[in-house]
Amino acid sequence: MIEKTINFSRRIFVEKTATAVAGLSIAPGVFLNQVAQAKPADQAVTSDVRWGMLIDTNKCATGCTACVSACNEENGIQSHNRPATDQVWIRKVKLRDKQTGHVTSLPMMCQHCEHPPCVDVCPTGASMKREDGIVLVDKHICIGCRYCMMACPYKARSFAHETVTDPKEYAPRGKGTVEACTLCVHRVDEGGTPACVEACNAAEHGAMIFGDLKDPNSEISKELEKHGGKQIRADLNLNTGVRYQGI
Amino acid sequence: MLQLKQLMHKSLLMVIGSALLALSTAVYADGDKASFMPDIPEPKDESLKCVQPEDEMKKNHMEYILHQRDKTLREGVRTKQYSLKECINCHVEKNSTARFGDDKHFCSSCHNYAGVTIDCFQCHADRPSSNNKHSQSTSSFPHYADNSVEGASK
């Protein structure tokens, strides 16, 4: 009974905070801090939400790597100066239309599929999808076989070849396991947004929107409804959580 | 002849016995008793209670951490009560020079002594970061609370 009361008041607090923070907008539609529904720490995630991302490639600046640096900084990813085997959680891809010469720039990372091939092929169950749609690797049981890396059509996963010194406490990483974008799950669980989205907004490009695809009132859902968003390799029917505009 | 042999055997045993006794007392007299036991660093704030009684933690800390790890990774439950991160926050100083493997690190002080190899810190941070969001001082729901807020149903 006591616990219920506490949870209730905490929820109200969260709602009030969200409203207060949402009020701190710089311009209409641009918020200083986008607060999603932070769940209480002691409750499991549910399929009532599905986290996703919408990337407007027309706003994504060629040559800008703010999202990549932010991701590396946030998750403690260090280069060993060996591009072929260095871990890559997010990378910039440049596409050039031969006919028109139009150059499209976009960030590419784990697409957090609804039907992830990496989860299908994993022999140990380490590759898994959370109820809220975030695809993760359970490094406790990952044996480093790298089947998931082969199965992923987006080349989103990397293998940690080297010993990790001083990992971030919220992003444990270790040699001999496969890793990929976690959608900054440690931030999301606290009602935050992924580091790449934050960096993109800080760089004033605003090309990335993060939010709940199942909430019709979320910014991402409204934008998707209004202008649409494409999946990369939609033919694979993976129903990706990351969508792109302008491709 | 047989008697003489038995006598010699007896005296030899006595010599060896007393030599061993002398050796053992010498070791005891030399180092103090603590050198036989692991020197486990005290928590940062001794006024804080651990999440379970000390004896229980000594025996079963791995069970608590194991269950919490699956709940956190797979279900996103991020209570602090049995979180490895909170063990480290409480038992290891920020920017501590003692790393896992050193006898001065809380975890390895005992694990080295017991000869039990763990691989937690091949991935996890073995000390709190300097910009720790979850340090006990800033937390509104400290992990050591009397179970009334978090983890009550665990």
Image (cartoon, coloured by chain):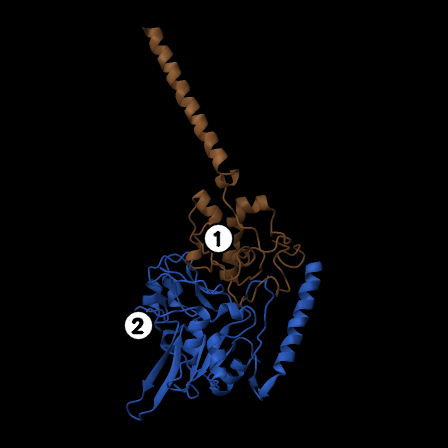
Mark 1, Cα crowd under 10 Å, few <14 / some 14-19 / many 20+, is many
Which picture quadrant has residue A144? bottom left
Left or right of B14, for residue B63: right
At label 1, the amino acid type is His
Going 35% across and 64% down the picture, which residue do you hit? A160
Position in image of residue B73 (x %, y %): 49, 61
Residue A182 visible, this orientation: no
Left or right of B51, for residue B37: left
Front residue of A170 and B18: B18
Q: Compared to A151, does B59 lie above or below?
A: above
Q: Which mark is residue A83?
A: 2
Q: Which mark is residue A4?
A: none
Mark 2, Cα crowd under 10 Å, few <14 / some 14-19 / many 20+, is few
Respond whether the residues carrying marks 1 and 2 are from the same subunit. no
Tint applied to chain A in the drawing: blue
Going 31% across and 92% down the picture, which residue do you hit? A101
Q: CA distance from mark 1 to mark 2?
A: 35 Å
Chain given the colour brown: B
Position in image of residue A37 (x %, y %): 59, 73
| On-image quarter of the C terminus of chain A | bottom left
Q: Secondary structure at mark 1?
A: loop
